[in-house]
Amino acid sequence: MRIDKYLWTIRMFKTRSIATEACKKGHVKINNVNAKPSKDVFIGEKLIVRKNQINYQLEVLDIPPNRVGAKLVDLYRKDTTLKEAFEHEDMLKFAKDYYRQKGAGRPSKKDRRDLDEYQENGTFDNEN
């Protein structure tokens, strides 16, 4: 089965065209080699799929006949993604929450002091 179709059938991507695009951009690797969308995938191969800044590590257990339900996905693949990858995503979300909104102007002296305080102690000074 083609790799783009396989990723679509195990619900890694919402549509097959999105899976194809991910392969073209180099976000999908089979046994640490970039995979074109038409590359065949076989049982026992290891996949690395980069999605939402996370490198998912999958092992092909079986080839599904067609798109499967979410509850049946684990029959066809084994997810060996490290927990650190998901923790890194959480840290990125927290980092994005602090940044100023676009158009809010230059940071003030207080903003700079708060950032310095955070970098030194890991906490913000809540005194106004």
Image (tube, rainbow, N blue to C red):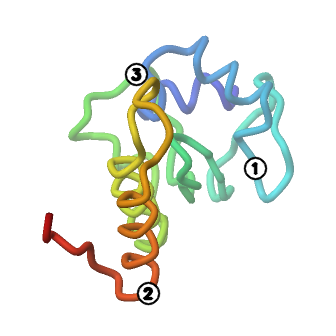
Between marks 1 and 3 in the image, the one whose residue lies nearer the viewer: 1
Whether residue 24 is visible, yes or no, is yes
Q: Residue drawn at (71%, 39%), measured in percent from left and top? A: 27
Query: Which image quarter holds the N terminus?
Result: top right
Q: Are marks 2 and 1 in contact (CB under 8 Å)?
A: no
Q: Secondary structure at mark 2?
A: helix
Identify the disc placed on residue 120. 2
Q: Earlier in the sequence, mark 1 or mark 3?
A: 1
Tag count: 3
- In the image, residue 4 above or below residue 27: above
Task: Please tell me which residue lies in front, 20 or 50.
Answer: 50
Q: Is residue 1 visible?
A: no
> Where residue 2 sits: x, y (%)?
69, 26
Relative to 51, say whether 59 is above or below: below
Residue for badge 1: 30
Q: Nearer the viewer, residue 69 or 18?
A: 18
- Give x and y (percent) for residue 3: 68, 31
Q: Which residue is mark 3?
A: 67
Spot occupied by residue 68 in the image (x, y as percentages of width and height): 34, 27
Are discs 2 and 3 less than 8 Å apart at CB? Answer: no
- Per the model, the C-alpha gap separating discs 1 and 3 is 20 Å
| Labels 2 and 1: the sequence-earlier one | 1
